Image (cartoon, rainbow, N blue to C red):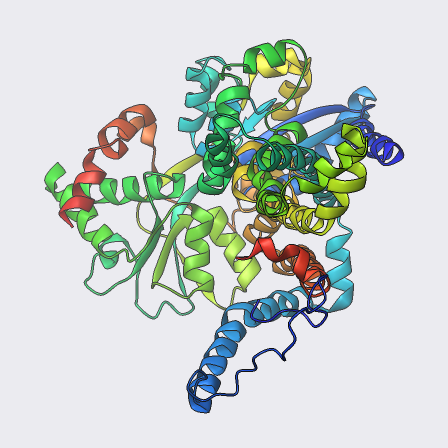
Amino acid sequence: MNKALRLLAAAALGMAAANASAAKLLNVSYDVARSLYKDLNPAFVADWKKQTGEAVDVDQSHGGSSKQARAIIDGLDADVVTMNNPLDIDAIADAGLLQKNWLQAFPDNSSPSWSAIVFVVRKGNPSKLKDWPDLVRPGVQIVVPNPKTSGNGRYSYLAAWQYARTQPKASDTDSIEFVKKLFANVPVLDTGGRDATTTFCQRGIGDVLLTFESEAKLIQANFGADKFDIVIPSLTVRADNPVAVVDKIAARKGNTRLAQAYLKFHYTPAAQEILARNGMRPVDAAVAQKHAAEFPPLHTFSVEKDFGGWAHAQQLHFSDGGIFDQIIARK
Amino acid sequence: MSALPADGGATPPTTPFAPLVQTNAAIGEPKLVRWTLIGISLVFLAVFLLLPLYAVFSQALEQGYKAYFAALVDSDALASIRLTLITAAIAVPLNTVFGVAAAWAIAKFQFRGKNFLITLIDLPFSVSPVIAGLIYILIFGSRGWLGPWVSEHGFKIMFAAPGIVLATVFVTFPFVARELIPLMQAQGADEEYAAMTLGARGWSTFWHVTLPNIRWGLLYGILLCNARAMGEFGAVSVVSGHIRGQTNTMPLQVEILYNDYQFVAAFAVASLLALLAFVTLGLKSFLEWRHGSELKALKGH
């Protein structure tokens, strides 16, 4: 028994000590960024080794972005966060773990890449869904995750709202009516973006899936480009993928310099190339130019400019009793 | 258990006449009813147990044995297997000691609040595992009661292996005690009294009298405890933090792989858990068959 215990203790310690020589950085990220960081982290590790001669390990944690933010506030030791919407980083800032003006800490609103909401339809687009008005036709089935719990859902909702609002002679009530009709066509509201993908692609429910362009490209890569088409609507929303150093935790772990360097690395041409290959739109003009064929031009709006910022949009549309709750209740 | 095992238990038959055999149509069921009932049970088992099991293994082996084993020796998968084994290796002995102590106290002594203690032991059965995870976040999270103190002293409990072990201990803690309490209550304290009157001390009474009496029940409890410790998802998911290659147990790894479109890898890890279930089931049936009479107090499992 004693021997067994000692062996066990040795195993446990061995696990902890295995990589003790290398500095360890923990990147807490959203659900579907795994394949991206599988490519990007080794590139950073090699680059860091070349520049400083130091070894570093980057650990990853992925999950629903709000759940991840919650875990950091509760004590998950994240040095950096890489998210798909700024709201969850704001929540961490509100808890006092990072500076309030994190959005200005890195270039392009601290967002090294961005994506946009597109339509994924079944091959050949049998229901002829070309733009937002086609989605509110009776009988069309839309798969979209719940705007209350997911970034995709919020962006999709706001994009539909903005489309209705920017039509000639439109008013806010038209937007409410439009979004209401759209969500009346949604048979299931999944909680997260990946769940919605599974519903649409594997369970075969619905005529169209509203999701990020990056996820749409992943769907084509994983399920076959011969099964699904991507449709780009006439107006869509720019969805930044913001990053931030979790100042308090990185400082406590002595990782501030490393964390800063890791996020800066996201803006290098090499990393931008990796982002582009993973379906994210790079902010680097040269890399974007090179991949212009894969990323057709979009007509976009931003939540910051057109909805008065995320905090405001969240409060007005998605809080308890907000406009989204009202249209769902009236449905 | 519908019938006594073949050896009929430890006590030799004392009745002078042959036991009653149910050949009488009046107390039996017509053949049609019997076969219909058996048929329904078999179809139910096939649809709800065998089919999913078949699905797990066929998915896991979809791309052949090479892909299957490659998925199992992936460093993240190996780390999840190691963490699962370590967690079980800590949680199960802890709960075994606790279970024996609690069952001993409850079965052999009279004291105030005994029923309350039994209720408390059952608590993890009635609490949702998610709540089990959240209570530890509330206690040891960085905004919890003890969290700041713990992190000041350089310990890491939440979102690390200790938190996972804690949550697992909580969830699996009734298994051993629940198996032993009825068994020890049925056995009573007579043999222990006898040992005492012959001059045995506390420990030697325990080692030579109590433990041999409860060993099969104990093993049975440990088995169930272990199966749950390795399979627990909800509570562990809340406290894990999901750091790849570090704080994911096997059930969490299965979910992650599945959500990453790595179906073969997901089902390969799942098949290991299914194998564990098979082993548990096999050992459980063996114990029931071999030591059924000693486990009789455990009806209902």
Q: Position of residue A195 (x, y in %)?
A: 44, 51
Q: Residue A196, image x and y in percent?
A: 41, 53
Residue drawn 73% across and 47% down? Answer: B213
Q: Classify residue B69 as left or right of residue A174.
A: right
Residue A243 in view, yes or no:
no
Would you place residue A96 above or below residue A77 in this image? Answer: above
Give the number of callouts.
Answer: 0
In the depicted structure, whether residue A212 falls above or below residue A284: below
Residues B240 and A164: in front is B240
For the residue pair A31 and B102, the one nearer the viewer reads as B102
Q: Residue at x 74, y 54 (%)?
A: B72
| Residue at the farthest right position | A3
The image shows residue B115 at horizontal and vertical percentages of: 47, 34
Q: Residue at x 50, y 69 (%)?
A: B48
Q: In the picture provided, is A135 more to the left or to the right than A218?
A: left
- Which residue, as the protein is rendered here, is positioned at the far front? B16
Dividing the picture into quadrants, the one containing residue A17 is top right
Image: B299 above or below A255: below
Q: Quadrant of residue B61?
A: bottom right
Q: Is residue B177 visible?
A: yes
Q: Which quarter shows the N terminus of chain A?
A: top right
Q: Is residue B169 above or below residue B10?
A: above
Left-right relation of A77 to A2: left
Q: Position of residue B143 (x, y in %)?
A: 49, 16
